[in-house]
Image (cartoon, rainbow, N blue to C red):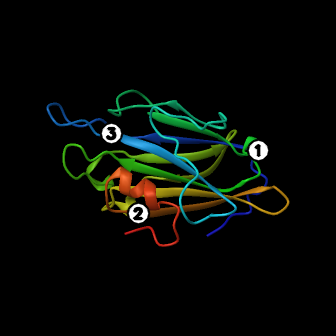
Amino acid sequence: MSTPNKDIDKVEVRLKWDPSDAGEPAHDLDIIAAPYTADDPYGRPAYLVHFDSRSPDGTITLNRDSRTGQGLGYDEIMTIELDRLAETYTRVIVGIAIQQRDGRKTFGEILRTGVQIREGYTNLSESDFSEVSAATAAVVAEFTRDSSGSWSFHPEVRGFDGDPDEFAAVMGSRTSGS
């Protein structure tokens, strides 16, 4: 599904969830961004941006990282400056992965999850992951650059079952999903 949102310059991906119950292992969700080059738009990502990292050129930055979901509002926020990405990058996939350190957890097992993608004050998409409640990770956005250099946003929520490393390796492929 695509949207008429073209020529997008800078977006913010915002993620929220409720903390686990007292005495239970913490719920840890992560935003992952993966840029792809024109030479391999559905293959291996050029690099990944997630917790404790940022893009080499500073165009994709995780501004806020949470390992517990504690706090008010959105727990993790990532900024993607599409207008500053080098021309070699023609596709950016954004996903959300649940850390699986303490046993398998799905979106349906974590209360009040939500992801919001915004450009300025405009909401481009929102999801509570109900459509992928049995998944452990999900692609939540695809941005593509056309031949004129304009970026388009393609909202999607596509579930995946596996750990964050497996998800990151295939999140931009044509066949990822559960």
Q: Dot 2 surroundings within 10 Å: few (below 14), some, or many (20 or more)?
A: many
**Residue indicated by mark 3:** 28
Looking at the image, which residue is at 14% across and 31% down? 23
Q: Residue 154: x percent and y percent?
A: 63, 62
Residue identified by numbered label 2? 159
Identify the amino acid type marked 2.
Answer: Gly
Percent position (x, y) of residue 104?
22, 53
Q: Earlier in the sequence, mark 1 or mark 2?
A: 1
Seen as rendered, the residue at the extreme bottom is 175
Mark 1–mark 2 Cα distance, whole angstroms, equals 28 Å
User: Dot 3 surroundings within 10 Å: few (below 14), some, or many (20 or more)?
Assistant: many
- Asked if residue 85 is positioned above or below residue 160 in the image, the reply reads above
Please give the name of the residue rendered at 55% of the width and 64% of the height, measured from the top-left corner: 43
Nearest the viewer among 174 and 66 is 174
Q: Quadrant of residue 45?
A: bottom right
* Relative side of 157 to 109, left or right: right
Residue that carries the numbered disc 1 in the rendered image: 83
Whether residue 6 can be seen here: yes
Left or right position of 15 against 166: right
For marks 1 and 3, give the CA distance.
30 Å
